[in-house]
Amino acid sequence: MIQRAIGSSVQVAIFVAPVLMLTSLVLGPAPMDLTFPKGLVLVVLLSVLITGQVSNDGRSDWLKGVQLLAVYVVLGLTFFFVPDVLPR
């Protein structure tokens, strides 16, 4: 079950980034590039590592869900209180 969710997320990410980049050529005020700030790349890397650790045994329960939600809240607070991580 967890592998399906992770696989679906990967498929969406692989599809969405190129579509947004191509759409920005037509609709956007400026073309989108795929240059990401270091902080955002670090957060994505940490998210992948945490997801791998949580889904390592192939089982899930409510505690793992709460842990993932806690990570989500911490990352959201990080982006809220350290706005320099994202470009303006």
Image (cartoon, rainbow, N blue to C red):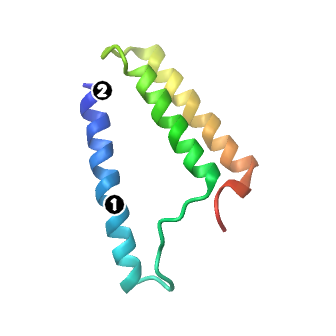
Name the kind of residue labelled 2 in the image. Ile
54 relative to 84, above or below: above
Rendered residue at 75%/47% (across/down): 81
Rendered residue at 37%/21% (across/down): 55
The answer to whether mark 2 and mark 1 are in CB contact below 8 A is no
Query: How many tags in the picture?
Result: 2
Instruction: Give whichever of discs 2 and 1 has the lower sequence position.
Output: 2
Rendered residue at 43%/21% (across/down): 54
Mark 1, other Cα within 10 Å: few <14 / some 14–19 / many ≥20: few
Q: Quadrant of the N terminus?
A: top left
The spot of residue 34 in percent (x, y) is 47, 66
Q: Where, by quadrant of the figure, is residue 2 drawn?
A: top left
| The one of 31 and 74 positioned closer to us in this rendering | 31
Secondary structure state at the residue bearing disc 2: helix
Left or right, 73 with respect to 82, comes to left
Q: Where is mark 2, residue-wise? A: 2
Left or right, 70 with respect to 26, comes to right
Res. 69 mark: none
The spot of residue 16 in percent (x, y) is 33, 60
9 relative to 12, above or below: above
Q: Quadrant of the C terminus?
A: bottom right
The spot of residue 57 in percent (x, y) is 34, 13
| The one of 15 and 79 positioned closer to us in this rendering | 15
Q: Where, by quadrant of the figure, is residue 20 drawn?
A: bottom left
The spot of residue 6 in percent (x, y) is 32, 35
Name the kind of residue labelled 1 in the image. Val
Q: Where is mark 1, residue-wise? A: 16
Q: CA distance from mark 2 to mark 1?
A: 21 Å
Mark 2, other Cα within 10 Å: few <14 / some 14–19 / many ≥20: some
Rendered residue at 62%/43% (across/down): 76
Secondary structure state at the residue bearing disc 1: helix
